[in-house]
Image: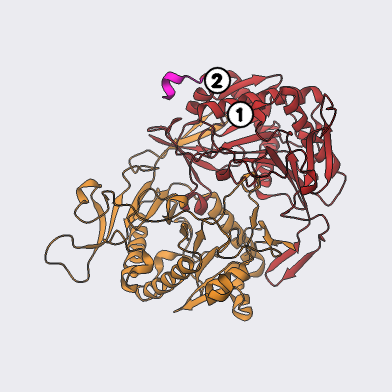
Chain colours: A orange, B red
Amino acid sequence: MPELRKDPVTARWVIVNTETPKIPGSFRLSSNKKSSKVCPFCPGHEAMTPPAIFTIPRRIRPKSGHDWQVRVIANKFPALRIEENIEKTPLGVYEKMGGFGAHEVIIENPDHHKEITELEPEEVGDILKAYRERCLDLRKDPRFRYILIFKNYGASAGATLEHPHSQLIGLPIVPSRVTGELEGAAWHHGSAHRCIFCDCLEQEGREKILTIFEEGGFVSLAPFVSRFPFETWILPKHHEASFDRISDEKLLSLAVLLQRTLGRIKSVLKDPAFNFMIHTVPMTALAEAPYHWHIEIIPRLTQVAGFEWGTGFYVNPTPPELAAQFLREENPRIIS
Amino acid sequence: MPELRKDPVTARWVIVNTETPKIPGSFRLSSNKKSSKVCPFCPGHEAMTPPAIFTIPRRIRPKSGHDWQVRVIANKFPALRIEENIEKTPLGVYEKMGGFGAHEVIIENPDHHKEITELEPEEVGDILKAYRERCLDLRKDPRFRYILIFKNYGASAGATLEHPHSQLIGLPIVPSRVTGELEGAAWHHGSAHRCIFCDCLEQEGREKILTIFEEGGFVSLAPFVSRFPFETWILPKHHEASFDRISDEKLLSLAVLLQRTLGRIKSVLKDPAFNFMIHTVPMTALAEAPYHWHIEIIPRLTQVAGFEWGTGFYVNPTPPELAAQFLREENPRIIS
């Protein structure tokens, strides 16, 4: 029977199909095979991109050729620009402001064909370190209110270049989805004096129905009110509002868990396109805010249609507890 | 230069690319060609679907065969069910309720190959009449809080059946996107004692930069803070909160405008997939609520990616005033 579930953070409802759930193999996927076009992100083509803003060098320095492991550049076709002004202009009932912001590309590693799932854990750690360092650097500019780090993998997830990369957008405004989470978390904290994300984790720690993997203080799980089939979140198990305060040691645990989780999504769902994004506190909030940073991974398995656009209400064809089971157990007997 | 625009209703911001705008012809589209599979919605196959809930007969009754022009049925694979209970159950920090609701399909006309753009205006009027009648009927059941009418056209817009059809979902909850609009409208009404949608229309009446077409008390326009390229809204020019209070005479004017607007989207953008949905006041609100019903049409031209999912912040590659010009003027010299 279908079921309606209420998100304890944002108070949004999701329709969950618990009756005829979609399982791995029942989604139509487009291929994510790579072509052999000239790639501006590959080593040796550095002149095709804007100059590096930040790099992490290779652990073993090669005798010749490129020496970067991770390379961060400005997006050549930015959604927002650092040189725009931030003044607001009224236009009758409307309001506009200059398109100020940052739009950077994190080239995750030199190899065109190695995604996060194929790297050494330390190399994944380097990507996460680049995320953190760019956040810490941009935090110095008080015009930024929010920084979103995200990855689009596969054309149907919005990726336009194949070389493994993530993106960063720095905004002069806290976006509405984050505001919604912050308000929900603040509301719960105001009444219960606890973090709502911590409460969810505490409940899951007892029930163990949504958990996929655990690793060094982090957990990957299917949220009880997932909007999308096989939606997967990674959260620190202990309260931490801000991603960019993460230690080097923790970065490596997170790298291991991210890699393991993405690897399982790849094998169980046959290499689907996906997006992931890091939700953290806005620059303007205190590091002690009642918020809990996390990574949201969304495999792109279904089309969002008129109902979802019209309402903000999602229909999820795969109950999260079933999705978690598939991702945790990878049981080929059930899958095929 | 990129520009940030604030929606006067929901207070959301959108990034608008005013510098290198995408114009018709620069989007990648998938084909919406029809196949020749057996169609359960075609006349003669009525036994393949649940029985009709409501029909509008053909104007000229045929001597033999089907006699319906519009046929409304229950969705065979419903997201929600009328027989589910509506009780809320706490599950620790979470809350769930039975999947109560209505999910109906409006088969728009007997001809598999005739979309709204190919029908007689009176036949489009019949579709809109079916929308209204189903709303009025469901309104009698106090368990419904909201009814969304929407259409998915083309596979990339989420359509799974080809025969021209729209859908209706009745919900026991007012969805978050509608709540956002209602709250924004109430806030403006509280301070200005005017409808924010009326204020926008009044400003556009003077500026004439976003208008596409006008017809018998309705206007189609590109909203100043469009989230998507070529997003188009249709609104009554005079204040009206509730769609289902529309008169028969007005229905025909709306039909003409809807057909003309969709026809222009089809010719200028080369038959794109699209969604449209009707936003109206919840069942629980008064018909005099400070809200203004409207139809939102969203051509599916771009992929929504990690940034949009992560933030609720949209990047629109086509300034709405340019989109309006293309749709209004259909100038083939500029388009090609």
Report if residue A105 lies within the magenta region.
no
Label 2, label 1: how far apart the Cα atoms are: 23 Å
Quadrant location of residue B147? top right
Q: Position of residue B253 (x, y in %)?
A: 72, 22
Whether residue B186 can be seen here: no
Same chain? Circles 2 and 1: yes
Left or right of residue A268: residue A111: left
Q: Residues within 10 Å of mark 2 (few under 14, many from 20)?
A: few
Q: Is residue B146 left or right of residue A281?
A: right
Give the numbered dot on residue B207.
2
Residue B270, above or below B148:
above
Chain where mark 2 sits: B
Which picture quadrant has residue B83? Answer: bottom right
Rendered location of residue B47, percent (x, y): 80, 47
Amino acid, disc 1 = Leu
Numbered range of the magenta stretch: B330-336
The residue at the far bottom in this view is A206
Mark 2 residue type: Glu
Residue that numbered label 1 is attached to? B262
Q: Residues within 10 Å of mark 1 (few under 14, many from 20)?
A: many
N-terminal label among 2 and 1:
2
